[in-house]
């Protein structure tokens, strides 16, 4: 078994009031535990194979599930991936909102705020790189496959823009907001490209990737 098998990114509490098309809600504790095992093993497998290569048989074997139990919860492999993506996005949205509204986000300088944002983004992409890659590739043929993750990025920008503007010496600059929004497009575009094709020289796991991205965004915004 792969050494990552059994790693737990998601837990049963995240299923509370969670619904997704093509997924039968898990009401009992045993059912919720099974769904979470399937989701966590799905995240692990997507690091090794693409969506097309994801085998329901292999997934069930790693999650100690039967194929029948899988299809009693999910209409199809597509429904499984969609539900997994939406669960991850829903949890991340809550974390983004909490991070800003609980005053955790730095408010002393643009550089510190962007460093915090980029570091969090890197951690997220490292954790969910396989899911992101599968979603990007599916988006070529399924236009809505990327929508939840794109909307997650838009949420981050919505919270970040006014805070960055408030830290600029000339927030009334007509181009300031456009520069901020483009800087986030640089961030997400770069991370998506690294996850999708890993062009190098910097990878998602390189210790300097977060620092380089934050400096690039800060320099562009403050220019």
Image: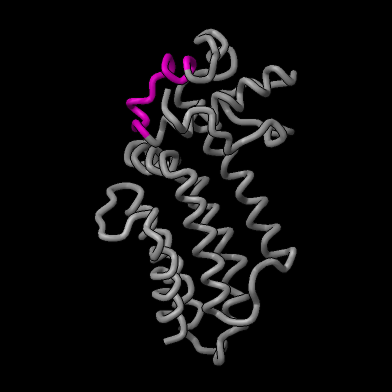
Is 185 drawn above or below residue 72 in the view shown?
A: below
- Which of the image's four quarters has the C terminus? bottom left
Choose between 104 and 73: the one closer to the eye.
Answer: 104
Q: Position of residue 23 (x, y in %)?
A: 59, 23
Q: Quadrant of residue 186?
A: bottom left
Residue pictured at 51% horizontal, 51% vertical: 124
Q: Position of residue 128 (x, y in %)?
A: 48, 43
Q: Is residue 186 left or right of residue 16?
A: left
The outermost residue toward the bottom is 169
Choose between 22 and 167: the one closer to the eye.
Answer: 167
Choose between 11 and 170: the one closer to the eye.
Answer: 11
Residue pictured at 70% horizontal, 17% vertical: 30
The magenta stretch is: 48-61
Is 45 drawn above or below residue 114 in the view shown?
A: above
Is 171 drawn above or below residue 135 in the view shown?
A: below
Q: Quadrant of residue 57?
A: top left
Residue pictured at 53% horizontal, 52% vertical: 151
Residue 53 part of the magenta segment: yes
Residue 41 part of the magenta segment: no
Q: Is residue 129 left or right of residue 109?
A: left
Residue pictured at 43% horizontal, 18% vertical: 56
Q: Position of residue 159 (x, y in %)?
A: 62, 66
Q: How many marks?
A: 0
- Which of the image's four quarters has the N terminus? top left
Colour scheme = one colour
């Amino acid at each position: 078994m792969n050494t990552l098998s059994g790693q737990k990114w998601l837990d049963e509490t995240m299923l509370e009031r969670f619904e997704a098309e093509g997924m039968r809600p898990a009401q009992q504790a045993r059912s919720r535990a099974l769904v979470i095992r399937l989701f966590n093993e799905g995240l692990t497998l997507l690091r090794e194979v693409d969506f097309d290569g994801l085998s329901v048989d292999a997934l069930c074997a790693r999650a100690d599930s039967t194929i029948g139990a899988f299809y009693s919860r999910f209409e199809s492999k597509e429904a499984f991936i969609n539900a997994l993506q939406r669960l991850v996005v829903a949890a991340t949205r809550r974390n983004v909102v909490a991070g800003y509204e609980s005053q955790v986000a730095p408010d002393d300088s643009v550089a510190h705020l962007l460093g915090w944002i980029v570091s969090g983004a890197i951690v997220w992409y490292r954790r969910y790189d396989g899911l992101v890659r599968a979603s990007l590739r599916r988006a070529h043929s399924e236009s809505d496959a990327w929508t939840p993750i794109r909307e997650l990025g838009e949420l981050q920008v919505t919270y970040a823009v006014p805070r960055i503007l408030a830290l600029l010496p000339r927030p009334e600059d007509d181009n300031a907001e456009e520069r901020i929004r483009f800087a986030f497009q640089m961030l997400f575009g770069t991370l998506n490209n690294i996850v999708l094709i890993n062009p190098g020289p910097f990878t998602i796991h390189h210790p300097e990737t977060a620092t380089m991205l934050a400096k690039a965004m800060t320099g562009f915004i403050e220019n």
